[in-house]
């Protein structure tokens, strides 16, 4: 019997930033969803100084995949080795390494290595995996470079905020209101259209057309990861022009419902969207106001809906 074939890939990019700054972005997986386009959500399963286990939800060739990886952090060598503990078909096994090489005090080289095997060594599945690695690696490296090189003003472009509505009723029913986003057009005044799909339990795709305060509308596309009756986390894969990234969460706890947003603003679109004299500060206020208004409306309607059903 022939031994399974292990395939290898390498992708690299040069970054105009210090190596340790770049390495810090690779280590900080909590910020991957706002930094890396393919990453939807990341959670720590175990966490130590040099070793950790993380669970990742990410897109691959248009599909949402999830897996748990063990990572070994070498802070002296500036490398992170990773290995999937249980892979998801068509991947039979996958691992690799991030390596950051200093070129000078202000420039570095990042190499991203992968090794993988396909289920049953199937040639079509092998090619599918290779395409996904090529696409995601290129997207991740480009995003890593942008985040590292924009570090000086990135803090101004990133905003995280939350809104809370007090609620002492049935949290499961309130969760169901948010979970059933396909019914939002009949339930929420700011949603004109919504198409919800859930081929894998707990993993949803949502395309939605939202009305804005000035009467116009915009379309977004999101992936949502559902943890029944506790939280729904999401990432917009298609965002309005004023954002380059938008992640969020709906949290359900005793006595309250909370909506959390993290947004990365598109600095180049600020004057185009808000006018020639608009600033990043104006964009921060505009985005926060619009998202808070819609989120609070959704939570208030969820509370009212549950109370009507109970009544």
Image (tube, rainbow, N blue to C red):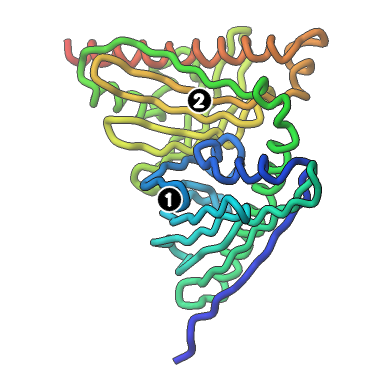
User: In the figure, is residue 154 to the left or right of 277?
Assistant: left
Residue 191 picture location, percent across and down: 49, 19
Question: Residue sitting at 76 percent across and 49 percent down?
Answer: 108
Question: Residue 52 shows which numbered tag?
Answer: 1
Q: Residue at x 45, y 69 (%)?
A: 92
Mark 1 near mark 2, Cβ–Cβ under 8 Å? no
Helix, strand or loop at label 2? It is strand
Residue at the limit of the structure toward the front, as seen here = 76
Image coordinates for residue 221, horizontal then vertical, percent: 55, 34
Callout 2 crowding tier (Cα within 10 Å): few <14, some 14–19, many ≥20: some
Q: Nearer the viewer, residue 187 or 242?
A: 242
Side of 240 where 224 appears, left or right:
left
Mark 1, secondary structure of its residue: strand
Residue in the image at 44% along x and 36% along y: 224
**Residue for badge 2:** 193
Residue nearer the viewer, 87 or 44: 44
Q: 10 Å neighbourhood of mark 1: few (<14), some, or many (≥20)? A: some
- Above or below, 215 relative to 124: above
Q: Position of residue 16 (x, y in %)?
A: 79, 42
* Residue in the foreground of this view, choosing between 49 and 156: 49
């Amino acid at each position: 019997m022939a031994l399974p074939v292990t395939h290898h890939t390498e992708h690299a990019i040069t970054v105009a930033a210090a190596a340790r700054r770049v390495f810090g972005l690779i280590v900080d997986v909590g910020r991957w969803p706002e930094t890396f386009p393919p990453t939807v959500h990341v959670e720590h399963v175990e966490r130590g100084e040099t070793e950790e286990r993380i669970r990742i939800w990410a897109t691959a060739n248009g599909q949402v995949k999830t897996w748990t990886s063990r990572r070994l952090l070498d802070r002296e060598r500036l490398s992170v080795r990773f290995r999937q503990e249980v892979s998801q078909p068509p991947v039979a096994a996958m691992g690799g390494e991030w390596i950051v090489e200093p070129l000078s005090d202000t420039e570095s080289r990042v190499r991203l290595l992968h090794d993988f095997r396909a289920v049953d060594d199937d040639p079509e599945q092998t090619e599918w995996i290779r395409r996904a690695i090529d696409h995601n690696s290129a997207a991740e490296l480009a995003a890593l470079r942008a985040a590292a090189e924009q570090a000086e003003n990135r803090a101004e472009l990133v905003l995280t905020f939350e809104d809370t509505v007090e609620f002492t009723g049935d949290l499961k029913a309130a969760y169901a209101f948010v979970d059933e986003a396909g019914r939002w057009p009949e339930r929420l005044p700011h949603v004109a259209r919504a198409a919800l799909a859930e081929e894998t339990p707990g993993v949803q795709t949502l395309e939605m057309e939202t009305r804005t305060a000035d009467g116009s509308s915009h379309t977004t596309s999101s992936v949502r990861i559902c943890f029944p009756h506790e939280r729904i986390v999401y990432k917009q894969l298609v965002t309005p022009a004023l954002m380059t990234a938008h992640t969020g969460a709906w949290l359900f706890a005793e006595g309250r419902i909370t909506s959390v947003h993290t947004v990365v603003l598109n600095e180049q679109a600020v004057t185009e969207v808000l006018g020639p004299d608009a600033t990043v500060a104006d964009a921060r206020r505009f985005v926060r106001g619009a998202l808070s208004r819609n989120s609070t409306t959704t939570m208030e309607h969820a509370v009212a809906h549950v109370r009507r059903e109970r009544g």
